[in-house]
Image: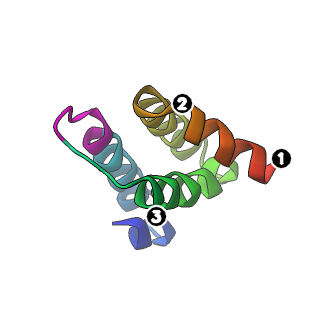
């Protein structure tokens, strides 16, 4: 799914972002710390996308990730700043 974030079609990128956000909302899903960091890092890259809808979708997905593990998300933010 992460590879589809680089798709040339905005609609596909938006839907994939929503799907990842839905995945983060699932309470029974367990991700290893390294997988979680990898997913967050790859989503975060798209915060500066030209499409503002995608920027917002990525931001909302990152909020879902932060609800799971705020420290890891903040650590990833600090790495890119």
Task: Tell me what residue is drawn at x 70 percent, y 50 percent.
Answer: 48
Vertical arrangement, residue 40 with respect to residue 72, above or below: below
Q: Nearer the viewer, residue 48 or 76?
A: 76
Residue at mark 3:
5
Label 3 environment density (alpha carbons within 10 Å; few <14, some 14–19, many ≥20): many
Circle 1 or circle 3, nearest the eye: 1
- Of the two numbered discs 2 and 1 on the same chain, state the one appearing first in sequence: 2
Q: Position of residue 44 (x, y in %)?
A: 60, 51
Work out which residue is located at the far front of the displayed protein and give it: 33
Label 2 environment density (alpha carbons within 10 Å; few <14, some 14–19, many ≥20): some
Q: Nearer the viewer, residue 16 or 73?
A: 73
- Of the two numbered discs 1 and 3 on the same chain, state the one appearing first in sequence: 3
Left or right position of 52 against 24: right
Left or right position of 10 against 56: left
Of the numbered discs in the image, which one, if any, rests on residue 70?
Answer: 2
Label 1 environment density (alpha carbons within 10 Å; few <14, some 14–19, many ≥20): few
- Specify whether residue 74 is painted magenta: no
The N terminus sits in image quarter:
bottom left
Vertical arrangement, residue 43 with respect to residue 5, above or below: above
Circle 2 or circle 3, nearest the eye: 2
Q: Position of residue 34 (x, y in %)?
A: 47, 60
Distance from disc 2 to disc 3, alpha carbons, whole Å, reads 22 Å
Q: Nearer the viewer, residue 5 or 79?
A: 79
> Which residues make up the magenta segment?
22-28
Residue at mark 1:
81
Q: Position of residue 24 (x, y in %)?
A: 32, 40
Left or right position of 68 against 26: right
- Of the two numbered discs 2 and 3 on the same chain, state the one appearing first in sequence: 3
Task: Tell me what residue is drawn at x 76 percent, y 52 percent.
Answer: 79
């Amino acid at each position: 799914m992460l590879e589809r974030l680089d798709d040339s079609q905005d609609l596909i990128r938006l839907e994939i972002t929503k799907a990842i956000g839905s995945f983060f909302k699932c309470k029974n899903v367990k991700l290893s710390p390294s997988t979680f960091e990898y997913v967050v890092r790859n989503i975060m890259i798209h915060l500066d996308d030209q499409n503002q809808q995608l920027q917002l979708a990525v931001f909302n997905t990152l909020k879902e990730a932060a609800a799971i593990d705020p420290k890891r998300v903040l650590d990833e933010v600090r790495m890119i700043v």
